[in-house]
Amino acid sequence: MSIPSKYDANSVESKWYSYWMKHNYFHSTPDDREPYTIVIPPPNVTGVLHMGHMLNNTIQDVLIRRARLLGKNACWVPGTDHASIATEAKVVAKLKEQGIDKNDLSRDEFLAHAWDWTHEYGGVILEQLKKLGCSCDWDRTKFTMDDDMSEAVIKVFVDLFDKGLIYRGYRMVNWDPEAKTTLSDEEVIHEERQGLLYYINYKIEGSNDVLTIATTRPETIFGDTAICINPNDERFSHLRGKKAIVPICNRVIPIIEDAYVDVEFGTGCLKVTPAHDENDKNLGDKHNLEVIDIFNEDASLNSFGLHYEGQDRFVARKAVAKELEDNEALVKTETHINKVGTSERTKAVIEPRLSDQWFLKMEDLVKPAIKAVLGEDAEIKLFPKKFENTYRHWMENIRDWNISRQLLWGQQIPAYFYGDGKEDFVVAETIEQALEKAKKITNNQHLTTNDLKQDTDALDTWFSSWLWPMSVFDGIRNPENEEIKYYYPTNDLVTGPDILFFWVARMIIAGYEYKDEKPFNNVYLTGLVRDKQRRKMSKSLGNSPDALKLIEDYGAGGVRVGLLLSSAAGNDLMFDEALCQQGKGFGNKIWNAYRLVDGWEVDENIEQPKASQIAIEWYESKFQKALIDIEDHFSKYRLSDALMTTYKLIYDDFCGWFLEMVKPGYQQPIDAKTLKSVITIFEDNLKIVHPFMPFITEDIWHYIAERTPEEALIISKWPETKAINETLISEFDFASEVISGIRTIRKEKNIAFKDTIGFSVINNERASTTFDAVIAKLGNLEAINYTTETIEGALTYRVKSNEYFIPMVGAIDIEAEVKKLTEELNYTEGFLKSVQKKLSNERFVAGAPEQVVASEKKKEADALAKIETLKTSLASLN
C-alpha cells in the first residue's frame, strides 16, 4: 500500500489510538519482566488540559513508551484528585445559579450534587490526555474519592491517631474567608504588597496622656486586649502598671511588658490582638489576656465590631480609619511594604484565626524522608539536583500539618463525639467500631450510633494524595497483595517544583511510614510553562493557548516536539507556537522521507554501488553514536537533549545526507541489498522517534510492511547498541566539506547538476579515499583525479590544506570572475594586515586573554590560506 502524499494528523491519531486501545497495549499485569511504573500526578477533577499538563504528561508518555520498547512491563497509572476547595467552590457556584444555598442542604444532599458534578465533568481532562497520545493504563484509573481510596485514607488517619501522631488542638490557623476553611502553612502564598501604617493615639486611663501605636490593620482595634511595651524601653517606663483606652469601643485594657516587642518598629509599642495574630496569641497565653474574635467566617466584622458589624474587613478598615481621623485619634499614615498571606487556591487574603483543628505531628515522621533524599546513601534522586536545597529548607523547618478542612467534599474525619466536651470523642474506621470504643470508655452499654456525632470537617486533599503510589495498588488496605509487591516502589515521578513539598515530600514521608521503603527512585521536576515575555501562562492573563486547538492545528506529535524542544529539566519553558510548527515540520520531513523510499523501484539484479555500501556503514555508526548519546540523556532526564539528538540525526544525517547518498539516479531502480538496509535503518529511526511522536511513527511503520498486532511499533524492540566506526564518522565529516565545496561552486557559477564536471585533488591532508564514490555521486563528477600540481584554468577551493580543482565548464564570464576574485583578494589582504598589526603589538599579546590571542592567530592562518586559494584561482583564469 502506497503512502499518501500528505500526513493527516487528525485522522491518523484517532485511528492509532483506537488501535492501541483495542489491542490493550497500555494495560499491565504483573509477570516475570522488569516492571517500569509511573503514577500520574492526579490533576484536579475540576480541571481541563492546560500547557503545564501537556508538558508534564508528554514527558511521562515519552518515558513510558521508551520503557515498553526496552521490553519492560510498563505501567502508567492515571487518575484524578477530588480537589476539595476547588471542586466545592464550583459546586457551590452551580447551586447558586440554580437558586440553591449550600447552607440549606444537608451533608448528604450537598454530596449528591458534588457527585453529580464529578460524574458530569470529572473525566474531561483524562479524555483530553488521550488526544495528546498518553498511553496510560486506563483500566487502572483511580479517583481519590473512590470507595477503596477513601477507605485507605481513613485507615491511615486512625492508625496515626492510635500512634499518638494525630491530635486535636485549639490553635491559630490560616483561614481562607472565601473558601471558609483552614489551610496548611504550605497552601499560603506570601506576597509583598504596599499598604499603610496607621499611627493611632490610645488615651491613658486617669490622665491626659496618650500612647501612639502603629498598626497595618486599624479594623482589629475591636479585638485589642492589651498594649505591650518593651521592659528595657525607658521611653515608656512611666506607663508601667497603667491602663489604656481603646479608641471607638472605649474598652479599658492593661499595659503589659515583654521583651518580644521590637523597640525599632513603628513607635516601639504594640497593640495585642490575641484572636488575630499568632504572635499576639503567644503573648496573650503568656500574660493570660482575654481573647476577642471580631470576625465572622467570611472575614466580615461580627458584633464586637459595633456599628461596623457585617462590613467586610477591607471596607471596615477605611471606615475605621476615617472615624479615627474624625475623632483626632489618627495621628498620621505612612506607606508600608509588608508580606501578606494569600490562599494558594482562591487568592483570598488569609486571616489568622483561632479554631479547633486536627494536626499531624511531623517532627519524627520527616526524618526518614530527609535521609532518603539528602543522606550519604540517598535512595531518591531529584532532577535537577538544585531542588535538594529547597527540599532541605522545607523539611528541616517543617511544622505540624493542619489536616482538617471545613468542607463537605472530601473524606470526613473519622472522629465521633459521644458527649458535650471537646475531648469526648473516639476515632475509628466505622461508626460501629466507634460505638464499641465509646461504650468501653463511658462504661455505658446503652449507647447507640444515634448518640454519636461524627466530626463535620473533611480531611485535607493532600492527606489523600500523599498515599497515591501505595493506594492505587491497594497497598494500604492489603499491604501484601501481588500488585503492590510487584509495582512498588515506582520508578519515576514527573511533576512540577511547585508541589515538591505539598505532594512529593509527603509521599516520601508516607512511603517510609507505611512500606518502610521509598515510593519512587527518581523525581523529574519540570519547569513552568511561560510565554515569550517570561510571564507564567494563566487564564487571567489570557496568554495560555487552547491546548486542544494546538493539537488540532499541529497534531499531537508537533505539539509534543514543540514542548520538549525547549524544556530542560527544572528550567522554565518559554513557549512559542513556532516550536509546534517546527515539530509538525519534523513529522512532515519523516513522512516525505518515507514517501521517497516508498517510490523507489527495486531491481534484484543490480549490484550494490560502492557509494551506497559506504553510506550504509557510515549511517549505522552515526546512528549508534547518536543512540549512545540519547540513552545517556535519558539516564540524566535530559529529555530535551535526547529529542534534539534524535532530531538532528534524522533531519540532518538521515534526510539531509544518507538518503541522498543511496537514492538511485533519476528514473533508475535501486538495488535490493541497499533498499533492504534502508528499510532496516528507517525502522530503527522510527523506534527512537516513537516515544516523542507516537502516531506518525506507528503509521509509517505499518506502511513499511503488513504487521500483525504482535508486530506493532509500540511493542517493538528498542535498537541495540553496537560497535561504532569513529574513523568512518570522521572521514565523512571531511568528505561532507568537500561535497559542500562542490555544491557551492555549482551554485555560484550556475553549473547545473546534470552537467558532469571534472575534479582533481592535491591531497596535502592525506585524506582517506573511502568516501570518493560518495563525493563523485553527490558532486556528479567524471572522476576524482589525484595530482601534485596546480590545475591551470580551474575553479579552486580548499578544505583544510587540500586543494580541489574544477575545470571551467560552460559559459563563465571570465572578466566578471576575475573582478570578483580580485575584490575578494584585496579585502582579505586588508583584513590580514589589520590582524597582523594587532598581533605585532606586544602589549596586546601580553595583556589579552589567551583565548583572544588564539582567536586572532586563527584569523591570521585562515586569511593566509584564503589568500593563497584566491591567488591560485586568479592565476588559473589569466
Image (spheres, rainbow, N blue to C red):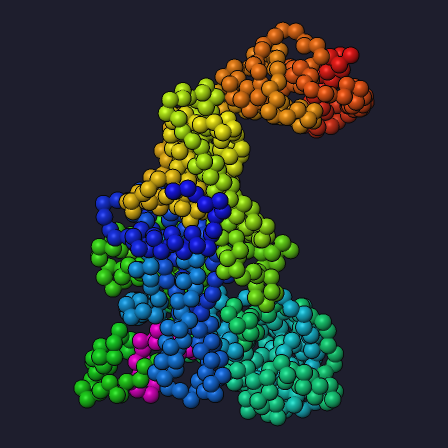
Q: Main secondary structure of the magenta part?
A: loop
Position of the N terminus, as image quadrant, is: top left
Tell me residue 775's x, y (percent).
55, 20
Q: Nearer the viewer, residue 740 or 748?
A: 748
Q: Nearer the viewer, residue 208 or 647?
A: 647
Q: Is residue 191 left or right of residue 818?
A: left
The reply to whether residue 747 is visible in this rendering is: yes
Tell me residue 138's x, y (percent).
33, 59
Q: In the rendered image of this protein, does residue 454 appear above or below residue 673? A: below
Q: Residue furthest top?
A: 788
Q: Residue furthest front?
A: 667
Q: Residue furthest bottom?
A: 307
Tell me residue 261's x, y (percent).
61, 71
| Residue at the image point whose x is 69% and y is 78% from the top | 198
Q: Is residue 220 left or right of residue 401?
A: right
| Residue at the image point whose x is 44% and y is 69% from the top | 46
Tell me residue 20's x, y (percent).
34, 52
Q: Which residues are magenta?
A: 406-424
The count of marks equals: 0
